[in-house]
Image (tube, rainbow, N blue to C red):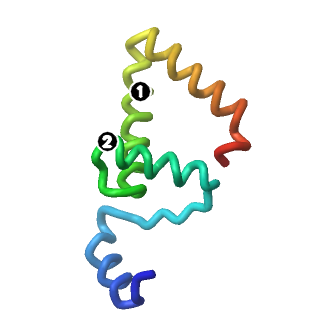
């Protein structure tokens, strides 16, 4: 855990562009994020969250113009909805 001074420094430096995100998720999600970080050469789980958001947004935008991407996005949405209790 970072010291109070280190946290204040981080917040004052990054306040205009970043906010801290603390979430409680199942161990499965932590493991998936660690795996994603390792597989994609990312700098840890926090960067894996950013990358996952980037990929999801990219897929949404691509789906607006490509039916294959739209179908894939729909499959992911349905799968997540079906298995939501495993991840949430």
Q: Nearer the viewer, mark 1 or mark 2?
A: 2
* Left or right, 76 with reference to 33: right
Q: Is residue 9 above or below residue 81?
A: below
- Density class for disc 2 (Cα within 10 Å; few <14, some 14-19, many ≥20) is few
Q: Which residue is mark 1?
A: 59
Residue 41's tag is: none
Residue at (52%, 14%) from the top-left corner?
A: 71
Q: Earlier in the sequence, mark 1 or mark 2?
A: 2
Above or below, 14 relative to 44: below
Nearer the observer, 32 or 52 = 32
Rounded to the nearest whole Å, what is the CA distance between mark 1 and mark 2? 17 Å
Above or below, 40 against 79 in this view is below
Name the residue beneath numbered marker 2.
40
Q: Quadrant of the N terminus?
A: bottom left
Residue 49 spot, x, y in % from top left: 43, 50
The percent coordinates of residue 87 (x first, y second) are 64, 45
Question: Percent position (x, y) of residue 58?
Answer: 37, 30
Q: Residue at x 73, y 43 (%)?
A: 85
Neighbor class of circle 1 (other Cα within 10 Å; few <14, some 14-19, many 20+) is some
Q: Residue at x 69, y 32 (%)?
A: 81
């Amino acid at each position: 855990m970072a010291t109070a001074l280190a946290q204040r420094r981080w917040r004052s430096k990054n306040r205009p562009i970043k906010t801290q995100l603390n979430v409680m998720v199942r161990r499965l999600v932590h493991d998936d994020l660690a795996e994603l970080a390792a597989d994609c050469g990312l700098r840890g789980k926090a960067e894996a969250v950013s990358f996952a958001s980037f990929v999801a947004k990219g897929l949404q935008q691509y789906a607006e113009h490509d039916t294959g991407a739209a179908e894939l996005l729909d499959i992911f949405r349905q799968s997540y909805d079906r298995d939501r209790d495993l991840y949430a």
